[in-house]
Image: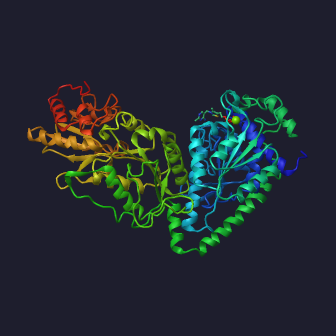
Amino acid sequence: MTQDIDTLCVDTIRTLSMDAVEKAQSGHPGTPMSMAPVAYELWQNHLRYDPADPVWPNRDRFVLSAGHASMLIYSVLHLAGVKRVDEDYNVLDEPAVSLHEIEEFRQLHSRTPGHPEYRWTSGIETTTGPLGQGIATSVGMALASKWQAERFGHELFDFDVYALAGDGCLMEGVSHESASLAGHLKLDNLCWLYDNNHITIDGDTSLAYGDDVLSRFEGYGWNVLRVGDANDRGLLARAFEEFKAESGRPTLIVVDSHIGWGSPNKQDTESAHGEPLGEEEIKLTKKAYGWPEDAKFLVPDGVMEHFSAGVGSRGAELRAAWSEKLGAADPKLAAELELMQRRRLPDDWDSAIPSFEADEEKGLATRKASNKVENAIAEKVPWMISGSADLTDSTSVRLNFDGVENFEPGSFDGRQVHYGIREHAAVTACNGMSLSKLRPLWSTYLTFSDYGRPGIRLSALMEIPVIHLFTHDSIGLGEDGPTHQPIEQLASLRAIPHLDVIRPADANEVAEAWRLAIERTKDPVALVMTRQTVPIFDRSRYAAAAGVRQGGYVLADCKGEPELILIATGSEVQLALGAHETLVGEGIRSRVVSLPCWEIFDRQDQVYRDEVLPPAVTARVAIEEASPQGWERYVGSAGTIMGMTTFGQSAPFADVEAEFGFTAENVTKVAREVARGATVNPTT
Ligand SMILES: Cc1ncc(C[n+]2csc(CCOP(=O)(O)OP(=O)(O)O)c2C)c(N)n1
Ligand SMILES: [Mg+2]
């Protein structure tokens, strides 16, 4: 092996990737082979990253948006000697990715799953795999870097964010939203690398794609550079230097490459994308690289040492200098930074949360109550960043205390982000901010949560505490009609693992929901609020809203054992209470259970759940202006669900609710029959 050390390093990335995919008989060898020089040049000579501390707050981020090329990042993490970090952010004296893990690529419980997964493998900055998510998330990271620079000082925060994208990432719609947002925000610390190889799974990109990518990104206000050959490390280096020197614009580096580079029979073909090369082809390719043909998982002497002398020593120096600066920083800010890094809250975070006086006449929309609580918390938690996809006041997420500004060029310390009508970019940016330890929330109407769903799912998969805030949460929004009235959204959000969906019934439940949301260090929540006014219940008459902490609780009860249970969420709890009062007057022993969060309730022990919903009481009615799907679990086979099995209607909200039977009178009627043991189908 006569190659120079740089080529040797690049070819080690290539051959490890080929060998791992071959052994697993599954995976994507072609892009790690062609992009190896790009990843190598970036990591070895530019990235400000200390492999000995992969959670150093000011590290440059590298996001592999083309997540299928996971062996590229696994090889680099291995060769760079990146350390493993435990759940409490302690760095361990073991590699994030050992050679053994590379041999176990894609196997059960290995640290090298098919696509890079945040939390699972140290050094992975975000989970990627759904194309477009990585680049979209990188925008939030770049935004966080800008914000943290303003808050904590430019000497402490100036990290850059690099994301490697393929044709797939740039074809996805979210790439448009996110690139447009990044261009508008002038995020000059953001660099996307576009692997322009003209190949996707179906074949040549000309099958489906003819964009002039350079013009497209120029149109977004990006600095667009082109490197005509992925193997030209000199040109790549120049492009990285130009990115670093650029100010006021994000940078796109278009890198022309050949998928499966060096493979005599598979280079430039779609089969190099997602199939093992095959034993014979691997030998031929290794021969072309000047590599021992029969060697497997070979890391030649000197390769890891070279990485260590490059990215390793540069990173160690930078981090040491940073630690010194942190030591000299204002202790208050340093303490705040430590809290933020560990996802903790300041001691007095909840001291201003209001308690709402009963008001059953005038009432308050839960979105309005939410705004008061959000502001009370945000004032105490400086790294909470609010935002909306052009519905800031409709979703009531405007921060309104002194000193709050919009996040925009010139005021990167702003805490109100206007994402424009870009829901998908909003949620993914929040994921990126959360991964950078800010506490972001984004908002839209519940029905448009669908537009951000891929990002919601990834926040849950990554178990990061993003707040997804949705208002206009039912047919109760009225005149905007069926396009805006969510039906299936609650059920579909509840189906996402690790996402708690909380739909509070009144202002005091809102306050509790917010506490739950902001106190968590992991897992996202969806806060679901009404557009319309709902009563603020008299808690001296009914149970305290603290019951929200158990996900569900007995809000109103009868004397003795109940014979009927009414279960509801959000705006329908008032209907259950209305019916309850009438039924109790008629001598029916009814109970009302407010169940704002199914997931939290389901995590309570059996004793508590049976206390709230005694198994012996089978006469139950669930009331929710949404798809009935899932309510069977709480009402049982003898119970009745008052839900929505059609789309809604456009009319004043009380008329729409009456049209579909959501009145206290109708709930009373249905409940009375259920209590008598009749089978009721409220949808007919
Ligand atoms: C949202 C989404 N849709 C589809 C896929 C399945 N998929 C994985 S890779 C790929 C083709 C990607 O092509 P490109 O980005 O050009 O990657 P290359 O083959 O050049 O590495 C597709 C369709 C996916 N991962 N994510
Ligand atoms: Mg491609």
Q: Position of residue 677 (x, y in %)?
A: 17, 28
Question: Quarter for ligand 1?
Answer: top right
Q: Nearer the viewer, residue 486 or 348?
A: 486
State which quadrant residue 187 falls in: bottom right
Q: Position of residue 155 (x, y in %)?
A: 63, 68
The residue that appears at 71% across and 41% down in the rendered structure is 195
Q: Position of residue 131 (x, y in %)?
A: 60, 38
State which quadrant residue 590 falls in: top left
Q: Position of residue 301 (x, y in %)?
A: 83, 51
Q: Nearer the viewer, residue 604 or 12?
A: 12
Q: Nearer the viewer, residue 653 or 442?
A: 653
Q: Quadrant of the C terminus?
A: top left
Q: Quadrant of the N terminus?
A: top right
In the picture as drawn, the residue positioned furthest to the right comes out as 2
- The answer to whether residue 20 is visible is yes
In the image, residue 119 sits, relative to residue 294, either above or below, namely: below
The residue that appears at 32% across and 41% down in the rendered structure is 477
- Compared across the picture, whether 471 is left or right of 611 comes to right
- Compared across the picture, whether 23 is left or right of 517 comes to right
- The answer to whether residue 549 is visible is no
The residue that appears at 68% across and 54% down in the rendered structure is 82
In the image, residue 564 sits, relative to residue 251, either above or below, namely: above
- Compared across the picture, whether 660 is left or right of 210 comes to left
- Compared across the picture, whether 241 is left or right of 545 comes to right
